[in-house]
Image (spheres, rainbow, N blue to C red):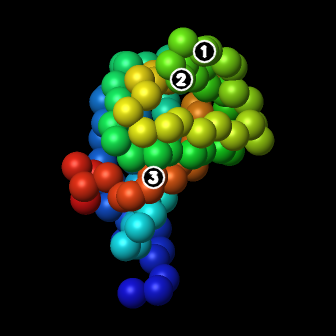
Amino acid sequence: MFFSYPQDFKERELTPGIILRLVWGERVMLSYVTFQPNRILPAHSHSNEQTGIVIEGELRLTIGDETRLCKKGDAFTIPGNVEHSAACGDKPTIVIDTFSPPREDYM
């Protein structure tokens, strides 16, 4: 299947108020992430490399020992097996993430 439409995306709730909509191929996964206001994604790590870009809102992102406030248009890269966490403020936030290889635990 070469095309996917929003109604085809697999939906997964990471924690209350953080929703992923997922599509993937053989070597890459795309995740459209919606954070409701004042949500926190606790520190975690995975073997997959992750890149992302903030589409709307703001996200306080910690990667390893470094924390930055990422705003609309800001991008980030998280190497595999590096602990990271995220928190959004009082506005809804949308992030596009990619994972390589695709996260099997999300499929």
- Name the spot of residue 12 as percent of width and height, x first: 30, 48
Q: Can residue 94 be seen in this view?
A: no
How far apart marks 1 and 2 lie (CA) works out to 5 Å
From the viewer's perspective, is 92 left or right of 29?
A: right
- In this orientation, which residue lies closer to the viewer: 37 or 46? 46
Q: Is mark 1 on a helix, strand or loop?
A: strand
How far apart marks 2 and 3 lie (CA) works out to 15 Å
Q: In which quadrant of the rendered view does residue 66 lie?
A: top right
Q: Which mark is residue 99?
A: 3
Residue shown at 49% from the left, 30% from the top:
36
In which quadrant will I find the C terminus? bottom left
Residue shown at 38% from the left, 19% from the top:
43
Q: Is residue 36 above or below residue 49?
A: above
How many numbered discs sit on the rendered protein? Answer: 3
- Asked whether the beta carbons under mark 1 and mark 2 sit within 8 Å of each other, the answer is yes
Residue type for callout 2: Ile
Residue shown at 77% from the left, 41% from the top:
73
- In this orientation, which residue lies closer to the viewer: 106 or 79? 79
Q: Is residue 42 above or below residue 50?
A: above
Q: Mark 2 points at which residue?
A: 63
Within 10 Å of disc 3 (Cα), the crowding (few <14, some 14-19, many 20+) is many
Q: In which quadrant of the rendered view does residue 19 lie?
A: top left
Within 10 Å of disc 1 (Cα), the crowding (few <14, some 14-19, many 20+) is few
Residue type for callout 3: Phe
Q: Is residue 51 above or below residue 14?
A: below
